[in-house]
Amino acid sequence: MIILGLDPSLSCTGWGLVRSEGSRLTHIANGQVKTDAKAPLPERLLHLHDAIFAVIGQYQPDRAAVEEIFANKNAQSTIKLAQARGAVLTACARGNLLVNEHAARLVKKAVVGTGAAEKQQVQAMLKVLLPGVQVAGADAADALAVAIADAHLAR
């Protein structure tokens, strides 16, 4: 089973693919989709959609997983996150993928063992769970964590 993990953001969306075979996980690929902050919002959303749809086309995952949306103190940030998430979810729907959604605390607990884990702890566990992985950046690391959590939670 190939799982596409997604960490949506308008500025930089992370994606990561893992293969889950029983309790065994293997890294397939990961990356980040950055958008031009000066570009109009519709162009940025289209870029996110098209880039994630291309990843789906290239790797043919069996399903996708994404973090549930959380409310920021800044309403504008929450709205931008929701719009980016919509573009990414639309790409998944267009690729006929089932999408599982997980709370950030649940992702951290599934990967590290505690829902209060710091980003550095999550990234350290990625290296343990996916030996030799070269992570494209923090957003890609978060996306891989979502994919791993989805694999663990599906068992």
Image: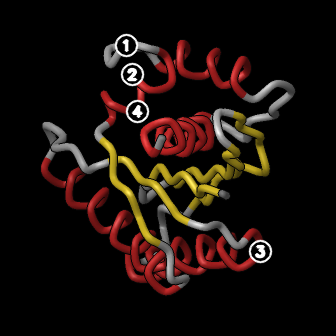
Q: Which residue is mark 1?
A: 114
Compare residues 73 and 61 and report the one nearer the observer. 61
Q: How many marks?
A: 4
Query: Element type at marker 1?
Result: loop
Mark 2: few/some/many CA within 10 Å (<14, 14-19, 20+): some
Mark 3 near mark 4, Cβ–Cβ under 8 Å? no
- Looking at numbered disc 4 in the image, what kind of residue is underneath it? Val
- Looking at numbered disc 1 in the image, what kind of residue is underneath it? Thr
Residue 13 x, y percent position in the rendering:
52, 55
Q: Which residue is mark 3?
A: 58
Q: Which mark is residue 109?
A: 2
Q: Which residue is mark 4?
A: 107
Query: Considering only order in the chain, which callout, 3 or 2, is on the residue closer to the N terminus?
Result: 3
Residue 26 x, y percent position in the rendering:
77, 40
Query: Considering only order in the chain, which callout, 2 or 1, is on the residue closer to the N terminus?
Result: 2
- Looking at numbered disc 2 in the image, what kind of residue is underneath it? Lys
Mark 1 near mark 2, Cβ–Cβ under 8 Å? yes
Compare residues 143 and 25 and report the one nearer the observer. 25
The residue sitting at 33% across, 35% down in the picture is 104
Query: Element type at marker 4?
Result: helix
